[in-house]
Image (cartoon, coloured by chain):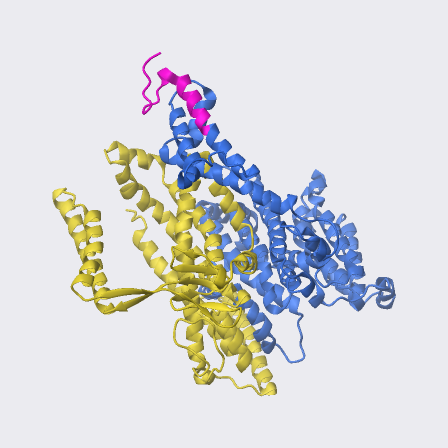
Chain colours: A blue, B yellow
Amino acid sequence: MSKINFLKPDKSNLYTFLYLGSFLFFVSVLDVFLNSFFRLNITGFLPGLLSFLFPLIIGFIGLYFIRIEFSGIKKLDLLNKHINTNNFNALLSLFIIFIILKSIPPILSWFFIDASFAGDSKDVCTGTGACWTYIKVWIRRFMYGMYPNGEQWRINLSFIALALLGSVGYFATDRFKKYLTLYYVVIYPFIAFLFIFFFISGGPVFFDFSYGIIAAILSIIIGFFIPSKFKFYYFLIVPFALYILLKYFIFYEELIELGKLDGLNWVETGAWGGLSLTFIISFFCLIFCFPIGMAFALGRRSEFPLIRYISIGFIEFWRGVPLITVLFMSAVMFPMFLPADFFIDKLVRCIIAISLFEAAYVAEVIRGGLQALPRGQYEAAKSLGMGYWRMHIFVILPQALKLVIPGIANTFLALVKDTPLIFVVGLLEIVGMLNLAKTNPEWLGFAMEGYVFAAIIFWIICYAMSKYSYNLEQKYKTDR
Amino acid sequence: MNFKLKDIGPQLMTVVAVVLIFGFFTYNAQVNMENRGIDFGYGFLSQESSFDVQFSLIEYDGSHSYFRAYLVGLLNTILVSVIGIFLATILGVIVGIARLSPNYLINKFAAFYVEFFRNIPLLLQIFFWYFAALRALPLPQDAEPIFGISYLTIKGLFVPAFIWENFNIFLYSIIATIISIIVIRSHAKKVQENRGKQIPVLLISIGLIIILPLLSFLIGGVKLSFEVPVLKKLATTSYIYDGGVSLPPELIALALSLSLYTATFIAECVRAGIQGVGKGQKEAAASIGLTQNQVLKLVVMPQALRIIIPPTTNQYLNLTKNSSLAAAIAYPDLVLVFAGTALMQTGKAIEIVSITMFTYLSLSISISVFMNWYNNKIAIQEK
């Protein structure tokens, strides 16, 4: 055994340093652990500040001792490489370990141990922890807003139906795979629109809904007999044509009777709210902003100067103003621009405003993708004799959209995160409902629980979306 | 014939459509305003506003004009944006570098921060800080002093105010410092290019920054004193701090949430920028004998900045636009003061909303024009 120099840990005394260092490190972590979990202060005998800094100093010395390069012990080398490369890093690592140890007990106790879950009135919330009873009592308001309790099955049913219809893509066999794009781009939004505006809204307009369903089913059945060459145009036109035909020319009286299905009360959009409204708005804006944005992205790269300048003006205008002023505009200024007897629903105005706003961002993202494509792609397509539209639909856009999946996903995330802003026009989705519930005199003082609850929900939605976009990006990644 | 129908047709159609839509809107607006007896015009800007604003940087009360109210709102917006940008940049750069740290814990901690704060709507964060977190602060009479001079209470942050004498002389000394530093830098660059000799610019600059303002204190007769906030009794149970500068809780909540939220995006920009500099660049720089600091300063940073700056400016713009969410917690910014209170009082919806939008539009367009110019300046000049 060679001489030990404590200022320079080396390999010759590996185990001495290893045992000593890990002991000191262990003691420092144990000290903080006991302190935060059991309120024990094993270093209480030391004077004031030293007692406070003791774990840091001891831990630092411990980490210094075990910082031996190429020790030959795999785990030690890994540890050194990851958290213990130099003095500064060791200090930071200790800080983070201590912060985590220190913050676990209060968070745990607030969330679970001291929290109250039972009961249905404010009286049970006497502890220091969170009052989840508050969320439990208000959950229907947070989810459905002012939508009448008895009618909420309509929202549930619609969302379940739409989720099922949306998941069709996973079960489609190869034979039907080629229609999926068409299904998602044309038919699905159409059905969703009918569901939301006629089923959730209900009332005398409900009979329209049955027209829509019949039109969709009929057109799908006939669709099987259409030669595949015309299928795209067929599904673009026929469902709508059938719908209009059914509504205005055929079966008028009979279908009204059929579609009424007694008892679906009309619920005005002002009563919609909560998380379901977040979903509805995000869904529609997502559907509308994508084609509009694509059109303006193409317009901005058009070779016609007038179209280009109009597109630039549109994009820069919406990108330059905050969403809140756009919503203000839709609320107070837009009605002035319409004929006096023409009234557009508040929710619809909101959806239009947000769609136009997000469309400008989508346009910029898609333009990025279009610019990133090498010129050769355009030239190759042209040399095959393709026109502008064929070139873009079959060659340029599929590649460009593939490139911009992350950007599009970010825009959609921003859209979901922007929905709470509709409080400006008086629509209350989940954050708005929280603010309303917070001011209820029976439930004062539970702002924190409400915001944490909403934050968790939004975080899950947004995180899932960003992970999904990452998966999509990996799936469609093609090497060039 | 020089032009063909094929070229003119689509353009004509678009223009006609746009003109028709705008014409339709204008016509309806005219009819509607006539029906309701509203006249269009910006004359109201000089009228007396007769409403009060809680927090303003310039002197303002109800007897001032609407234009003054507009200025108050604009200045408040700029104030919160500048504070937010400052904090977000510092935090964002730190987190962005931490994301690249070889230290596993730091790396994961930074990643956690980014994933956590950027997946929660900004409005929710503002509400959280304002209605939940800041409401848990002590009342003014119970507040513990921070360093003995500042108080963080439920009614805001109270810090000492600076009281200057001969402030303009101090200002001149600062200007002189900046000019001399610029001169020395350019001189040092010339010397290095001509003779290959290095002048310690950083040391000289730090010296100048300390010495010149100090001289202004010693010789120029500049005096600085502090006005410490003092607890004052308003009513039997209501206290407030008097004197010093008070930052309202709305401003704190807004600046805090804006910077925490935007910092996550800036962090990602910084990370992407530094990762975007090729490994070969660093190795090449090291192989010609540059020191670690020189590699960072002369090779990595100039290239990384080129990638970092454009998206970061975008984030600054977003922050400025997001500061309009202030309206939700009653911080008197442009939207709340002008598009809220002033609009309610005058009913001039079109004028006021258009002024507000135009203000934001000109702010963002001027910043993006400046950024384009800067971007062109630092872009690689390909030969």
Residue at x-position 77% and y-position 63%: A148
Image height of B148 relative to A203, above or below: above
Give residue A292's position: percent from left, percent from top.
Answer: 57, 60
Q: Is residue B322 left or right of residue A230?
A: left
Magenta residues, dominant SS class: helix
Q: Quadrant of residue A137?
A: bottom right
Q: Quadrant of residue B124?
A: bottom right
In the rendered image, residue A5 lying in the magenta stretch gets the answer yes
Residue lying furthest left: B195
Q: Quadrant of the N terminus of chain A?
A: top left
Give residue A296's position: percent from left, percent from top.
Answer: 52, 60
- Total labels drawn: 0
Q: Is residue A319 visible?
A: no
Tell me which segment is drawn in magenta: A1-25
Query: Front-most of A275 and B244?
Result: B244
In the rendered image, residue B228 lying in the magenta stretch gets the answer no
